[in-house]
Amino acid sequence: MLIQPIPAPDLLAQPPRPPGAPIPTERPAIPSPDQDRYYDASGPAFARLQRANEALAGFPVDRAGFIDWVAALRDGRIAPRSARDGLAPPSLHDLDVVMRNTKEMPWVRFPHLAHSQWLDCASCHPSPFAEKAGAATVTMERIFRGEACGMCHGKVAFPAWQQCERCHSVPVSGAGSLYGER
């Protein structure tokens, strides 16, 4: 069964980019349609809240227009804390995991370093991922259901139903590419 992800309504509301228009590299300060629906307008601090378009203006974006959080981290636009008090240094883990059970797709490279720069190990281990190679069952169906990688991707990180090559990045001899070549 083919699973068709349903994009968030505000993604559908964005007008298409005119042909030949340059791909933006930074998020514009223009408010998205209905962005105030994410705020409680009846709350006492509503008028003082910074809107998303103001807070994220100038942040780097990927080719689909989503905030590129890794680029923002690398450029010094953000400095995540590894603990609430901000005193503990992050526990960096520079190890890539390659997942080979991808059918005819390129293999998946999971970069621990990009994730451990702002997530504590306990965010993913032992649940939803055991700290043992091959112990986790990761499928696109589970990701689309908000499980495994989908706990973040599609919510606070780039959506898994766009830009397959961001995860499926390890070429495999004899397998098809993401663009149909063999």
Image (tube, rainbow, N blue to C red):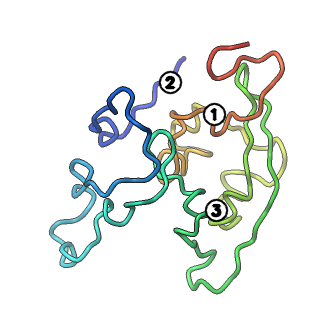
Q: Earlier in the sequence, mark 1 or mark 3?
A: 3
Crowdedness near tag 3: few (<14), some (14–19) or many (≥20) residues, C-alpha within 10 Å:
few
Which residue type carries mark 3?
Ser
Residue drawn at 18 percent across, 78 percent down: 44
Q: Earlier in the sequence, mark 1 or mark 2?
A: 2
Res. 165 mark: 1
Rounded to the nearest angstrom, the CA distance separating label 2 from label 3 is 27 Å
Label 1 close to label 2 by CB (< 8 Å) = no
Residue 3, given in percent of the width and then of the height, sits at 50, 24
Where residue 41 sits, quadrant-wise, is bottom left
Q: Quadrant of the C terminus?
A: top right
Residue 111, given in percent of the width and then of the height, sits at 73, 51
Q: Earlier in the sequence, mark 2 or mark 3?
A: 2
Q: Is residue 5 left or right of residue 49?
A: right
From the image, tell me which residue sits under label 2: 3
Secondary structure at badge 2 equals loop
Crowdedness near tag 2: few (<14), some (14–19) or many (≥20) residues, C-alpha within 10 Å:
few
Rounded to the nearest angstrom, the CA distance separating label 1 from label 2 is 18 Å
